Amino acid sequence: MIRIGIDYYPEHWERSMWEEDAARMAALGTHVVRIGEFAWSRMEPRDGEFHFDWLDDAIEVLSSHNMKIILGTPTCCPPMWLYQAHPDTLRWERDGKPTDTGIRGHRCLTSPTFRKYAGRIVGEMARRYAGKPEIFAWQLDNELDSNQCTCPACRAAFRSWLKEKYGTLDVLNKAWGNEVWSGEISDWEQIQPLLGRGNCPNWYNPAWLLDYERFCAQSTADFVQFQCDMIRSFDPQAVITTNACFPQHMPDFHREFAPLDVASYDNYPPILLPEDPEEPYSNAFALDFVRGFKRKNFWIMEQLGGPMGCWAPISPAMEPGMLEGYALQAVAHGADLLSFFRWRTSRTGAEMFCHGLLDHNNVPNRRLKELEQLCRRLEKLPGLGDTTVHSQVAMLYSADQEFALKNQEQSKGFAYWTQLRRFHDACMNLGVDLDVIEEHASLEGYKVVIVPTHFITEPEVVARLEDFAGKGGAVVVTCRSGVKDKNGNCILGQELPTLFRNLCGCHVTEYDAIGPAVQNLVVERGGDYKITGWCDLIEPDTAQVLARYQGRFYGGTPAITKNQFGAGTAYYVGTIGERAMYRTLLIEIFRGNDIPHMLLPQGVESSSRVGEDGRYQFFFNNTVHGQNLRLDGQKVHLQPFEMRILTPQGTWA
Ligand code: GAL
């Protein structure tokens, strides 16, 4: 069964409204309600004075309508008294100063004082609610980002982390290449978190930055482990998650979710689709990425329920069909539970125009109707919850690439995510399921592995890819792979793609970081495509040429190659192309590797979930226009944002 839930803030509403709210939620067909994640000042209004009666009451009211509870720990919003009494609990900004209070999320996850108070409130909650049948699961904190804090506790912790990693300053100086700009460190105290003065992180040593990013991400992961251990010490059976988002400073999600039972994500797909037809906007990428955190089905803790308008002007209204369609898109990619943000639009506070399912007027509206329709539709598909996504194609992701490429943009506009998204976009459009997996994850069961911009390259990862290709798999490597070693320094004395050269059977003689300029490329077997961002000028060793550049001084030079490697193949893509280029390339690869695919109109996605009963195939129109498909000779029409589901029985649901 797929569970539908609601994010609810009982502390925002009069007690007299709870009963009616719970009854209405249940009548719509929802099953779960998430509460509590920001309510610390209500749970502990003064130091050590705990008030849980109101929470007990809310849980009772909601449960009496058969709603299961997901209980949030409130550590994202420490109360004002804590900052006043203990300013060392505040997060410090990159400018080396404490952040402002009165917002949220402004606590340092490393601060020992914060840990003490956070541990206490979480422990009190766990003690009180452990084993209660009403509690379905726990959500830790809210949308944790990487703890990029520069407070004294973080400075000290960063130094200890480095001491542990490198042992001596000699080793650290060598690893970071500190001979440049007299950067040699002679005392551990000289090491700081990297501050943003002058607003120019690009002047810092990238190796230092990389370790700083790793350390901050580790602090977040440690905080998750800390809360998780606290809850489990009272309730070993507790089901625990935290709600991921993709903030400016990304944590290392795979590390963060390792101790948790299930991955979850706050899913806010675009209300306004981009005008640029080349922008891969589909949230399917985020969904497949999140499924990869634990390589299993996941939850949505916040699902788009109304027009946005929190820290930005109010967004346009949601299109008809969007609420239901986007929710089913998440289901199609492996979501087993979706909790909608939020029941009613807030009357007060910074998010008073971030719309929930209900507007301020509290009157049933078309969004609520769509939610009800969604619930009724899913009720008719009880077997769907027992299915999972089975992919023959994987894409490698690693936090290190994200960290390193964010801090050292390779050409103007070059972004790791864009590279990942472009391949993903083409797979969706060809109806091919794709897993986004961590670079060290097993490759077993896949036929094709896509490796976009593997900037920081470990020999062990390359060896596994060679083994995979040698045994018959296909590997796709793209530009800016094999550039750096694990320390974040350039690999010397080998032509790019260095460690990947053997696998790809080609090398790069020169590159052209063209940034936003647009050029052309011609595919040998026909078709020319626009390219941008980067051009590797390739010379094949053993590879065959699939596409060549057009124009500039390197017109005719290979841009994409294919190499026979053992029983398999390796492709090298030296540039970044328009959407259609990926489609053409992937069609060739899928044909060569017996991966069934279909040609769908742009913006239409197909993916599947499979279980003992068979396959549920999803067809989603992620555009504002009606679209027609031909499936086995049958004409299928999709309204804007409509999702149609072909059941194992061959009927449409
Ligand atoms: C999320 C957050 C929610 C709310 C929502 C508004 O990022 O977790 O608490 O702020 O955005 O869109």
Image (tube, rainbow, N blue to C red):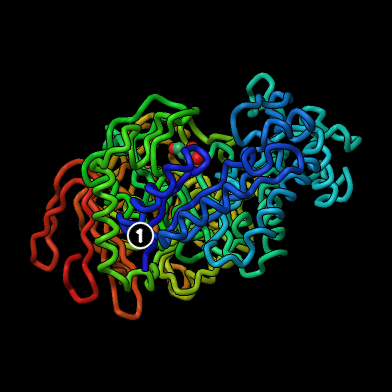
Q: Secondary structure at mark 1?
A: helix
Query: Which quadrant of the structure image shows residue 579?
Result: top left
- Mark 1 neighbour class, 10 Å CA radius: few under 14, some 14 to 19, many 20 or more: many
* Side of 272 relative to 509 (left or right): left
Residue that lies at the very extreme toward the right in this rendered image: 187
Q: Is residue 490 above or below residue 135?
A: above
Q: Which residue is mark 1?
A: 331
Residue that lies at the very extreme toward the bottom in this rendered image: 612
Q: Identify the image quadrant of the C terminus.
A: bottom left
Depth check, front residue: 152 or 531: 152
Q: Give x and y (percent) for residue 16.
A: 44, 42
Q: Give x and y (percent) for residue 399.
A: 59, 50
Amino acid beneath label 1: Val
Q: Is residue 382 above or below residue 161?
A: below
Q: Residue at x 72, y 37 (%)?
A: 46
Depth check, front residue: 63 or 517: 63
* Side of 429 relative to 424 (left or right): left
Q: Give x and y (percent) for residue 448.
A: 41, 65
Q: Residue at x 37, y 44 (%)?
A: 304
Query: Which quadrant of the structure image shows residue 78?
Result: top right
Badge count: 1
Depth check, front residue: 440 or 130: 130
Q: Identify the image quadrant of the N terminus.
A: bottom left
Camera sees residue 59: yes
* Side of 393 relative to 241 (left or right): left
Q: Residue at x 38, y 29 (%)?
A: 517
Q: Give x and y (percent) for residue 326.
A: 31, 49
Camera sees residue 390: no
Residue that lies at the very extreme toward the top in this rendered image: 198
Q: Is residue 475 above or below residue 568?
A: above
